[in-house]
Image (cartoon, rainbow, N blue to C red):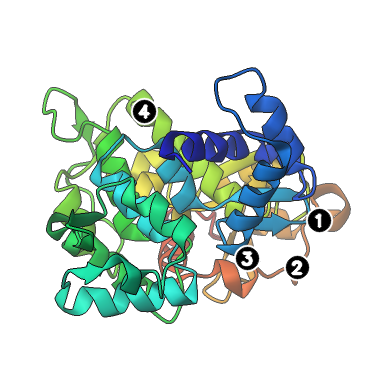
């Protein structure tokens, strides 16, 4: 499949996912979106493609419909023939066990290999899409990872080899951020340059890609990244508030744990681990410090809320509520620690 057509379909899926489109209905919705354009695809071909995306775990199936995974979203939005495009297609296929094995084996010494050898690990459709980016250096039908991408490939593989698989790698997110925010343009005013980032395990990777400290004074500079931040939280939390279950998109807020105004680095501002998807009511209460969470995910109430007799009925808050383990990543726990210390309304 041609790269531009593939990106177009991914972009359509990304655009319609908040409409609660099921896996069964998605092919027809995509077909309707591209009808009349120069893209010529039969409905059966689109159905096969969406099955392929599901098989490769590029789609998440939720009770409220499908959702494109963050690496595939970055790929759909990436610039043509850029490093971000190559590394995002690389990461998009990383959940396929056979492809993951090939990635690790190839990275060891990165030799040129016959295409036929590569096809023993990577299916033809996936390899065709990869070859339309700069991921591989190709010489006389032999290929290897492009040498200039080896650092990014190595860093992404290291993250996916951790005990807890990331939703999207820090490496790819930082590279995508770097491609959108003009952090090298010193004419753009930055604030919070003396603030400290949380202690990221991969802090050196972040700073290697984006050395500049602080965040843009004008929040509009990060508008495109805030869209990605919200999109990623919708993906992670299955399009609903984890506290009350509200799942109407317009009533959901991508709520920062460490407020945007306090972020010490642009990466903190767009990191999904620095966020929770909350309904408007719970977003306000969390933002104002009326409740927080401990390291195990148990909710902690401020004295003002704790004294409310109608906590359950009026506020949809339960004293024994706990965030699910899947949301308690190492970095999110660090952001929650910040929230407890600086945002939460402690008893006097």
Q: Mark 1 — residue?
A: 311
Residue 209: percent from left, percent from top: 18, 51
Question: Which of labels 4 and 2 is toward the front?
Answer: 4
Q: Residues within 10 Å of mark 2 (few under 14, many from 20)?
A: few
Residue closest to the eye, 152 or 140:
140
Q: Mark 4 — residue?
A: 219
Q: Residues within 10 Å of mark 4 (few under 14, many from 20)?
A: few
Q: Secondary structure at mark 2?
A: loop
Which residue sits at x=61%, y=48%?
234
Determine which of the numbered discs, if any, sits on residue 319 in the image: 2
**Mark 2 and mark 1 residues within 8 Å of each other at the beta carbon:** yes
Q: Secondary structure at mark 4?
A: helix
**Mark 2 and mark 3 residues within 8 Å of each other at the beta carbon:** no
Which tag, 2 or 3, sits closer to the chain's start? Answer: 3
Residue 135: percent from left, percent from top: 26, 54
Q: Mark 3 — residue?
A: 300
């Amino acid at each position: 499949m041609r790269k531009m057509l593939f990106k177009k379909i991914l972009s359509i899926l990304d655009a319609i996912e908040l409409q609660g489109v099921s896996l069964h209905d998605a092919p027809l919705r995509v077909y309707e979106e591209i009808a009349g354009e120069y893209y010529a695809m039969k409905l059966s071909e689109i159905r096969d493609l969406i099955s392929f995306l599901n098989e490769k775990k590029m789609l998440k199936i939720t009770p409220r419909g499908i959702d494109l995974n963050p690496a595939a979203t970055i790929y759909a939005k990436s610039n043509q023939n850029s490093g971000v495009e190559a590394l995002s297609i690389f990461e998009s296929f990383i959940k396929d066990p056979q492809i993951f094995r090939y990635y690790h084996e190839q990275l060891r010494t990165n030799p040129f290999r016959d295409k036929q050898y590569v096809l023993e690990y990577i299916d033809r459709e996936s390899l065709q899409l990869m070859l339309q980016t700069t991921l591989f250096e190709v010489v006389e039908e032999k290929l290897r990872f492009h040498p200039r991408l080896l650092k990014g490939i190595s860093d992404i593989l290291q993250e996916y080899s951790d005990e807890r698989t990331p939703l999207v790698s820090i490496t790819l997110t930082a590279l995508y951020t770097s491609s959108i925010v003009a952090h090298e343009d010193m004419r753009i005013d930055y604030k919070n340059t003396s603030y400290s980032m949380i202690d990221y395990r991969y802090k050196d990777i972040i700073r290697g890609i984006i050395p500049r400290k602080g965040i843009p004074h004008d929040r509009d500079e990060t508008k495109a990244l805030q869209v990605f931040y919200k999109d990623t939280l919708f993906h992670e939390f299955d399009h609903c508030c984890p506290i009350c279950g509200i799942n109407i998109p317009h009533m959901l807020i991508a709520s920062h744990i460490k407020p945007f105004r306090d972020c010490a680095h642009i990466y903190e501002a767009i990191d999904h681990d620095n966020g929770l998807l909350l309904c408007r009511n719970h977003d306000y209460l969390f933002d104002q410090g009326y409740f927080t969470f401990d390291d195990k995910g148990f909710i902690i109430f401020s004295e003002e809320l704790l004294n409310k007799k109608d906590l359950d009925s009026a506020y949809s808050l339960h004293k024994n509520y706990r965030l699910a383990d899947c949301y308690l990543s190492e970095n999110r726990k660090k952001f929650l620690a910040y929230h407890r210390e600086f945002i939460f309304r402690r008893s006097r």
